[in-house]
Amino acid sequence: MRNIFVYIGLVASIANVITAKRAVPGNIVAPSAHTVYQFPDHGSWIANIAGRRNSGLVVTRADVPEAWAIDAHSGTAEHIATIPDVSSLVGITAIDDDTFVVVAGNLSLETLEPQPGSFSVWKVKLGYNTVDVNLITAIPEAKFLHGVTVFRRHKGCTEVLIADPAQSAVYRLNTNTAKYSIALQDNVHLAGANNIQLHKGYLYYASTPNKFFGRVRVSWHDASARGDFQTIFNNSGVVPDGFALSRDGRAAYMATLQQNSVVRVDLNNDRHGIVTIYGGENSTDIPGPTTVILQREGRRNTLYVPTNGGLVAPVKGTYTEPAKVVAIKI
Ligand SMILES: *[C@@H]1O[C@H](CO)[C@@H](O)[C@H](O)[C@H]1NC(C)=O
Ligand SMILES: *[C@@H]1O[C@H](CO)[C@@H](O)[C@H](O)[C@H]1NC(C)=O
Ligand SMILES: *[C@@H]1O[C@H](CO)[C@@H](O)[C@H](O)[C@H]1NC(C)=O
């Protein structure tokens, strides 16, 4: 069990902090950014984020098994759900308007290890004045469920893919029938792959512990591999965590966890240049960014970046703060 703990972006010793050699700061006009919401409590940790209509956001927390709705306009937050019998929420994705799939399980924030067999997948549905929280299924075979993304809608059912970095695998789950199985497994290319996104027939994956980012074409039928695994970068100085793809698929916006930045990865040509667009190793703008989502708002795109406040790798070795969500206009 090598480095199993690093997966949630729950990473790693300070010794692991490395300089992003290829991530050149300042190449892009400084984007405008502001804090949308910051939790009041030190020790808070946002694991993941999903978008709603009208500047709404939903975040999952790893320090408590809670989901919160955040209104990016008013800068307010509301607790919406607590999942029983687990310590943490991890991945989240919208499967319909105001309906979310949420991954839950036991993770020790002290040792940073997941408890294999404790992971389950839930449906959280926001109504006008109500919240329905329902177990879809436990996946007791899973060792560590992390990122989740929509695979397809088929015969009235929504299927999702869920990364299991500890098994170098990706599960496919039908959220209506609760049937699940491993769709992809590869001990090299999915080793520690904790974040996944589907775009135009390709599954993109990022491994925080092994510091690579890649993609593979997958079958629309069952999400099995339909081609070679393609490494986009590997040990290029970036510690990749959650990411979002631009709509045209020409770029990925990625959180770099203990490098405290968001980088843009060029997917348009084979060099795959990496440029820092916000934050930086010694910057307290976004300590411990865990992922990125891209929302279209009017004619502009906004990146929403949640953080863990630098809890595991404090900025300059000392600075931590409560978790927050920052909006970056691009
Ligand atoms: C999570 O850990 C707690 C404390 O050890 C335990 O009581 C609970 O059953 C665990 N949950 C699952 C789903 O295994
Ligand atoms: C990344 O590079 C390492 C060291 O060269 C290699 O062992 C590993 O297989 C590579 N991983 C991927 C996904 O390309
Ligand atoms: C961050 O600060 C350290 C210590 O002062 C310094 O060695 C390092 O070069 C700085 N990194 C950047 C990207 O400025």
Image: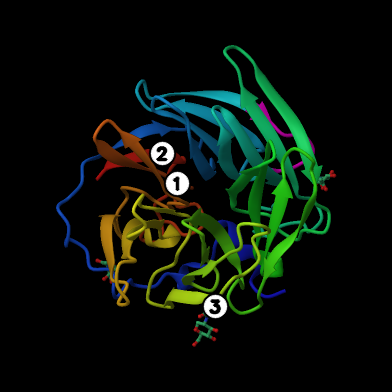
Q: Is residue 303 magenta?
A: no
Q: Is residue 100 left or right of residue 177?
A: left
Instruction: Give the vertical position of 289 relative to 72 (above or below).
Output: below
- Which of the two discs, 1 and 3, sits closer to the camera? 3
Which residue in the structure is indicated by mark 2? 325
For residue 307, the mark is 1
Residue 92 in sight here: yes
Question: Cβ(mark 1) to ligand 3 < 8 Å?
Answer: no
Position of 74 relative to 188 (above/below): above
Magenta region, residue range? 81-87
Is 2 on the left or on the right of 217, as rendered?
Answer: right
Q: Earlier in the sequence, mark 1 or mark 2?
A: 1
**Secondary structure under the numbered disc 2 in the rendered image:** strand
Residue 294: x percent and y percent? 38, 44
Residue furthest to the top in view is 129
Sort mark 1 into few (<14), some (14-19) or many (20+) by Cα contacts within 10 Å.
many
Q: Can you tell me whether the CB of the residue at mark 3 lies under 8 Å from the nearest atom of ligand 2? A: no
Q: x, y percentage for residue 134?
A: 75, 30
Which residue lies under the disc numbered 3? 228
- Rendered image quadrant of residue 259: bottom left
Whether residue 298 sits left or right of residue 192 in the image: it is left
Q: Label 3's element?
A: loop
Q: Is residue 230 above or below residue 318?
A: below
